[in-house]
Amino acid sequence: MSQLSNLPTIKDVFDHINDKYPNWIFCSSKSFSSDYDYLNKNWDMTLNSHRDKGIEIEKQKIILVSGFNKDDYLSFAEVLTRVGFIVRSVDDFQLCSECGLALPTISYYNKMKINNMKIPHFWLSRCSNC
């Protein structure tokens, strides 16, 4: 991870990740769907908690990856998270086919439902307003 932390730009970090594991990063989104707005609010709260400590982090993107089955993947995710990204598995999130915002997969939606999280009454593969 120290090698990643020493790279001068975010682009360099992504280049390093893509060189080492070209199929790990699947896609990205600028935000979660407003159907799951509390996920956006949690992301904002996390960034604000860093700001309260004097660490300025700008909100970046949600990065969907093929999984976390290698130790390197966790290191990559940690570095990206430190600079404002959210890294999630494609097993848990997908993109709306209409607008490209992140939505939970049906299996993750069902986990959220079991855990009594604030979610829509039924799962859709696209945003409710698309």
Image (cartoon, grey):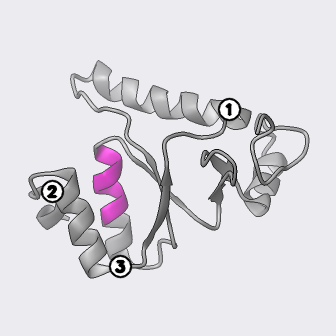
Q: Disc 1 designates what residue?
A: 34
Q: CA distance from mark 3 to mark 2?
A: 19 Å
Image coordinates for residue 107, horizontal then vertical, percent: 77, 63
Name which residue lies at 43% across and 45% down: 61
> Which is in the foreground here, disc 1 or disc 2?
1
Name which residue lies at 35% across and 75% down: 71
> Which is in the foreground here, disc 3 or disc 2?
3
Question: Is there a contact, CB below 8 Å, between mark 3 and mark 1?
Answer: no
Q: Secondary structure at mark 2?
A: helix
Compared to residue 17, the image places residue 10 above or below, namely above
What is the magenta range? 76-82
Q: Nearer the viewer, residue 71 or 91?
A: 91
The magenta stretch spans residue 5? no
Q: Amino acid at mark 3?
A: Pro
Q: Which mark is residue 15?
A: none
Q: Disc 3 designates what residue?
A: 22
Q: Disc 2 designates what residue?
A: 5
Name which residue lies at 47% across and 78% down: 69
Q: Secondary structure at mark 3?
A: loop
Quadrant into which the N terminus falls? bottom left
Q: Amino acid at mark 2?
A: Ser
Left or right: 110 with respect to 72?
Answer: right
Left or right: 113 with respect to 77?
Answer: right
